[in-house]
Image (cartoon, rainbow, N blue to C red):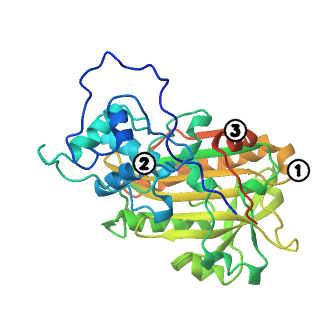
């Protein structure tokens, strides 16, 4: 069974007791008044951050963030556990309230939450746009930033996808089953300041998203053919990819040896579309093992996501991924594996930006983020246990 990422309160700060404090701060909102741990938090004696035990106080914070539209509703089994979604919601709430964002609920953040629910306070303006995934840069460039990708590390394709795979002899390559010592995490984005004009009309973000997504199978349009070529795996995948891609499988031809602009040796791989939504403008793929007569193993094991979200007065088109080299050959050549992927997604940034500007739009390439961490350290630090097959 796949154990959920550990996620709730940490032990409170070192007990430097504040005996000199006579008047403790108290809540103005009735929502938080009867919770001793939240009172400690308001007075700087307790901080809530990602950890692994259930906490009723965390559940109270989560329900407040849901009502404030900083967090989408939480599955009942997840309430009370401080995981990546809670971290991201707190981070966005802090930014919206001009607090120093760290994804943790300390006294300043607790005070801001209290004010948000204090009926004696002036009512706030328009509610913030709901967020489902973080769209800022990773909050930390060390291993402490791993929670930003934890939803990908933990992602399991839905039953609708998994149940369709046996007939095609496909198997998901989960990150925990890979052999590579390193976990790669990355984020590549293009800020689209003005949407492109297609057929005489400025397109909507949804249309732009679909244009880019469906164009992935057109060589050299959004991905440089010298780094990879995407195509439908079987005839049934062609119409599926173009209209509703969930369960569609893409074959990826990865050049191993390139001489004088001719790819002489290819490594074939495949991915299956495991999540897709036009309303939230994102899709995810899982790397898959195919029959040896076709592609065999994908060189990396893990999940990748693409999407388009509102950001900084425009929209960003992005990809982010979390994966590990699959077998011994890939582990031995992991630097080359990671470098090849980096070149591919850098080309995506360039080509998406060029497409937008060639069609009378405005685009800005964001500085990419890519880093590798020892998998054993990630498992140890975040208490991950996995046994998915």
Q: In this view, does 293 lie to the left or right of 300?
A: right
Q: Which quarter of the rendered picture does the N terminus lie within?
A: bottom right
CB within 8 Å, label 1 to label 2: no
- Residue 61's tag is none
Considering only vertical position in the picture, is 225 above or below 122? below
**Local SS, label 2:** helix
- Residue 328's tag is 1
Of marks 1 and 2, which one's residue comes earlier in the chain?
2
From the viewer's side, name the closer residue of 235 and 101: 101
Answer yes or no: is residue 141 visible: yes
Q: Residue at x 11, y 44 (%)?
A: 120
Residue 253: x and y in percent read 75, 63
**Local SS, label 3:** strand
Can you tell which quarter of the image residue 383 is in? top right
- Residue 373's tag is 3
Q: Residues within 10 Å of mark 2 (few under 14, many from 20)?
A: many
Residue 333: x and y in percent read 84, 44
Residue 20: x and y in percent read 31, 15
- Residue 58's tag is 2
Q: Is residue 201 left or right of residue 1?
A: left
From the viewer's side, name the closer residue of 325 and 226: 325
Report the mark closest to the observer, 3 or 2: 2
């Amino acid at each position: 069974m796949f154990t959920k990422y550990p996620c709730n309160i940490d032990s409170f700060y070192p007990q430097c007791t504040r005996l000199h404090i006579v008047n403790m701060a108290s809540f103005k909102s009735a929502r938080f008044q009867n919770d001793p741990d939240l009172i400690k938090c308001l007075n700087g004696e307790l901080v809530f951050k990602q950890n692994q035990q259930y906490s009723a106080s965390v559940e109270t914070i989560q329900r407040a963030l849901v009502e404030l539209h900083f967090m989408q509703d939480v599955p009942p089994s997840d309430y009370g556990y401080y995981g990546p979604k809670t971290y991201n919601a707190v981070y966005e709430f802090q930014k919206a309230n001009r607090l120093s964002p760290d994804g943790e609920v300390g006294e300043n953040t607790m005070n801001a939450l209290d004010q948000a629910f204090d009926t004696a306070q002036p009512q706030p303006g328009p509610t913030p746009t709901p967020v489902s995934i973080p769209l800022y840069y990773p909050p930390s460039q060390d291993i402490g930033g791993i929670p930003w990708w934890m939803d990908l590390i933990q992602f399991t394709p839905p039953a609708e996808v998994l149940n369709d795979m046996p007939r095609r002899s496909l198997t998901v390559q989960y990150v925990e089953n890979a052999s590579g010592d390193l976990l790669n995490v990355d984020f590549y984005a293009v800020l689209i300041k003005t949407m492109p004009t297609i057929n005489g009309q400025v397109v909507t973000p949804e249309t732009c998203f679909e244009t880019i997504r469906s164009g992935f199978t057109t060589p050299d349009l959004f991905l440089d053919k010298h780094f990879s070529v995407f195509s439908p795996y079987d005839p049934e995948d062609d119409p599926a990819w173009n209209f509703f891609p969930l369960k569609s499988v893409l074959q990826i031809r990865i050049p191993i040896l390139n001489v004088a602009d001719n790819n002489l040796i290819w490594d074939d791989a495949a991915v299956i579309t495991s999540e897709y939504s036009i309303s939230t403008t994102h899709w995810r793929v899982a790397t898959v093992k195919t029959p040896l007569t076709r592609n065999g193993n994908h060189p990396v094991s893990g999940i990748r996501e693409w999407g388009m979200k509102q950001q900084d007065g425009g929209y960003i088109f992005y990809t982010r991924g979390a994966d590990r080299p699959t077998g011994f050959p890939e582990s031995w050549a992991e630097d080359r594996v990671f470098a090849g992927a980096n070149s591919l997604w850098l080309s995506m940034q360039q080509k998406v930006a060029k497409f937008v500007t060639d069609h009378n739009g405005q685009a800005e390439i964001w500085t990419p983020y890519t880093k590798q961490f020892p998998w054993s350290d990630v498992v140890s630090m975040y208490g991950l246990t996995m046994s998915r097959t």
